[in-house]
Amino acid sequence: MTPAMKLALIGEGIAKSQSPDLHRRLGSLVGLDTQYDLVDSLGVNAFDFPATVARLQAEGYRGSNVTFPFKEAARNLADTLSEGVKRVGSSNTLIFENGKIHAENTDYSGFISAYRRQFADRPAGSVLLIGAGGVGRAVACALGALGVTDLYLVEREPTRGESLSRDLNKQGIITRMLTVDEAESRMAQFDGVVNCTPVGHINHPGCPIRTDRLNDRQWVFDAVYIPARTALLIAAEHQGASTLSGVDLFVFQGIDAFRFFAGKQATAADIDTQVGSVRDHYFEQLVVNSGTSAP
């Protein structure tokens, strides 16, 4: 009997993560027995991330997803880095092979996959990005890969915003900082509007910016997916804008991670045939049934 593919998620406060369900579900669909464990640093004194990764390697794990607050540490542990990790500067997926660690960033690749599935070849155009944290950084770099023409950044912590702006400009992604007032006054001019802050989450209700100037020529994405239809997305729909839900990012970043973990044990075609059903499952769970689990 083939042993299970052993995976994990390392992070803080991850008890309600949907990731175990996603990876076990994908494994079942492609005929690959999959074990997925949570390694939660919450409440653990002096949690040692490098030692934890080394232990997982020693115990025969195929890899691990990584979330807050260890994504930068994950990048620094890796022997090899994907292009996405090099661009973003952090990793949410570590693959263990032949005693080495390879780092991927599937928030980066997953956003590209989600955008193209929803909008096909639609140009990203000029985009307002709200939030320069980990997900905001990954999505900003992904927008660069999608050909964004100009990126306008709103971030309440100026140092973090300026750091991201500098990094993006070095990559050739034309980026400018705006205040909230400036962004709201120019709202109708943007081709896309992206929220990568927690505002709109069930635990942080509200809308990250005024929406009365959104219009039907725009596309709008919200990284928040609980609830899946946030105040921002509902307002965008009312104004006739095209929308992309955070559910898509959750699903596609997970599917991309599973591809890397599975390697040659499951073909790309095997996984591709399951994308629609997996996405539909989580839309039903998180949109129709209003699920309340955390990422």
Image: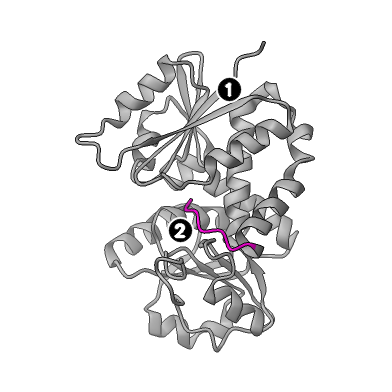
Spot occupied by residue 265 in the image (x, y as percentages of width and height): 69, 22
Q: Quadrant of residue 190?
A: bottom right
Color encoding of the figure: one colour
Spot occupied by residue 206 in the image (x, y as percentages of width and height): 44, 76
Neighbour class for label 1 at 10 Å: few (<14), some, many (≥20)?
A: some
Residue under pointer 1: 5
* SS category of the residue bearing label 1: strand
121 displayed left or right of 187: right
204 over 167 or under it: above or below? below
Name the residue rendered at 31%, 60% in the picture: 160
Which circle, 1 or 2, is nearer the viewer? Answer: 1
Visible residue check, residue 33: yes
Q: Amino acid at mark 2?
A: Gly
Extent of the magenta region: 289-295
Residue 131 or residue 231, whichever sits in front: 231
Name the residue rendered at 58%, 22% in the picture: 5
Residue 48 or residue 98, whichever sits in front: 48
Dots 1, 2 in contact, CB < 8 A: no
Q: Quadrant of the N terminus?
A: top right
Residue under pointer 2: 136
Q: Amino acid at mark 1?
A: Met
198 over 234 or under it: above or below? above
Neighbour class for label 2 at 10 Å: few (<14), some, many (≥20)?
A: many
Name the residue rendered at 41%, 83% in the picture: 182
255 over 192 or under it: above or below? above
Name the residue rendered at 79%, 40% in the picture: 273
Spot occupied by residue 136 in the image (x, y as percentages of width and height): 45, 58
